[in-house]
């Protein structure tokens, strides 16, 4: 993958770039938020490792500007340990994953590998439909009632899990496993935030498809006919 590392601690940035390079990625670093946005919109990397606390423009600002500029890179946000509100805010702002500092380089590499993985399992049919919602698992496009919907890579992965078995109820734990591939410290809050984001985009323009099954989990199904 082509990866942009936005980290103002230059020694850490160098370590990350060299670890990524050793693992076959093409990585570059920027140390300032504004320079990072320019680089992200010129180079169009596949993934951005984004430190939250950056000079010039912080990680939230970078994320907003990159998304506003049409940048579709997956974003792994780096936060200081224990900044729970920051993690939640980062996910709300469109980050796909987060990692608290200090972290082990192996953990960073594992997260990046998981983010680079496409989809969750091979599907017999790439074209999925529930009611007027259409998903092309190959092109990774989504439309409802013929209107295209922009999803972040993680939002898409989550939708794909729900779409592959309409009507089946998925527990939050199972969603964590399928979408994030590992159980580690992901908790129900992360799933709730992503479900909330999906709902805003998918269910804004038609009958509700994503349902909460109280104390069990979530399901996606067509509205029942009267
Ligand atoms: Ca920093």
Image (tube, rainbow, N blue to C red):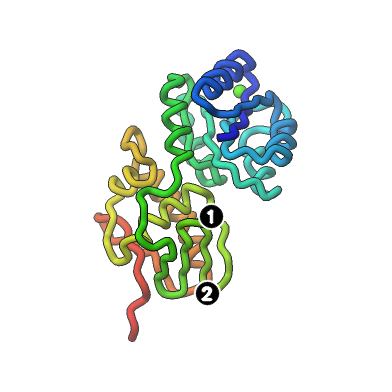
Which x, y percent locates residue 39?
A: 72, 34
Where does label 1 land, which residue? 151
Query: How many callouts does the rendering have?
Result: 2
Label 2, residues with CA under 10 Å away: few <14, some 14-19, many ≥20: few
- Quarter in which the C terminus is drawn: bottom left
Question: Quarter containing ligand 1?
Answer: top right
In the picture, the quarter occupied by the N terminus is: top right
Labelled pair 2, 1 in contact (Cβ < 8 Å): no
Relative to 179, say whether 3 is above or below.
above
Look at 59% across and 32% down and name the residue there.
3
Q: Spot the residue most to the top.
A: 11
Callout 2: SS = loop
Q: Position of residue 211 (x, y in %)?
A: 35, 64
- Res. 198 in view: yes
Earlier sequence position, callout 2 versus callout 1: 2
Q: Is residue 62 left or right of residue 188?
A: right
**Residue closest to the far left:** 216
Q: Which residue is nearer to you in this view: 198 or 17?
A: 17
- Residue occupying image coordinates x 36% and y 52%: 122
- Above or below, 75 against 204 in this view is above
Where is residue 63? Give x, y as percent. Answer: 63, 41
Tell me the SS state at disc 1.
loop
Q: On residue 145, which mark appears?
A: 2
Q: Can you give x and y, in whole percent of width and height, for residue 104 in the image?
A: 43, 19
Crowding around mark 1 (Cα neighbors within 10 Å: few <14, some 14 to 19, many 20+) is some
Q: Quadrant of residue 57?
A: top right
In-image side of 30 versus 107 (left or right): right
Q: Which mark is residue 120?
A: none
Give me the residue at 62% from left, 34% from top: 59
Identify the residue at horizontal 47%, vertical 39% (top origin): 115
Of residues 126 and 30, the one nearer the viewer is 126
Quadrant of res 149: bottom right
């Amino acid at each position: 993958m082509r990866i942009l590392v936005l980290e103002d601690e230059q020694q850490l940035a160098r370590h990350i770039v060299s670890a990524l390079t050793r693992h076959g990625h093409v990585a570059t670093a920027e140390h300032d938020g504004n320079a990072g946005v320019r680089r992200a919109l010129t180079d169009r990397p596949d993934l951005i490792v984004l430190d939250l606390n950056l000079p010039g423009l912080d990680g939230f600002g970078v994320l907003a500007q990159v998304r506003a500029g049409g940048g579709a890179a997956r974003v792994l946000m780096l936060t200081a340990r224990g900044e729970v509100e920051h993690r939640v805010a980062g996910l709300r702002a469109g980050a796909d994953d987060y990692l608290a500092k200090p972290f082990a380089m192996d953990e960073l590499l594992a997260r990046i590998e998981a983010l680079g993985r496409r989809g969750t399992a091979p599907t017999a049919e790439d074209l999925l439909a529930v009611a007027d919602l259409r998903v092309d698992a190959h092109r990774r496009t989504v439309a409802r009632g013929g209107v295209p919907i922009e999803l972040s890579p993680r939002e898409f992965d989550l939708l794909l899990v729900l779409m592959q078995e309409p009507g089946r109820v998925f527990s939050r734990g199972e969603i964590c496993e399928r979408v994030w591939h590992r159980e580690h410290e992901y908790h129900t809050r992360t799933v709730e935030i992503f479900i909330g984001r999906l709902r805003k985009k998918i269910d804004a323009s038609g009958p509700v498809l994503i349902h909460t099954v109280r104390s069990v989990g979530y399901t996606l199904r067509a509205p029942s006919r009267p």
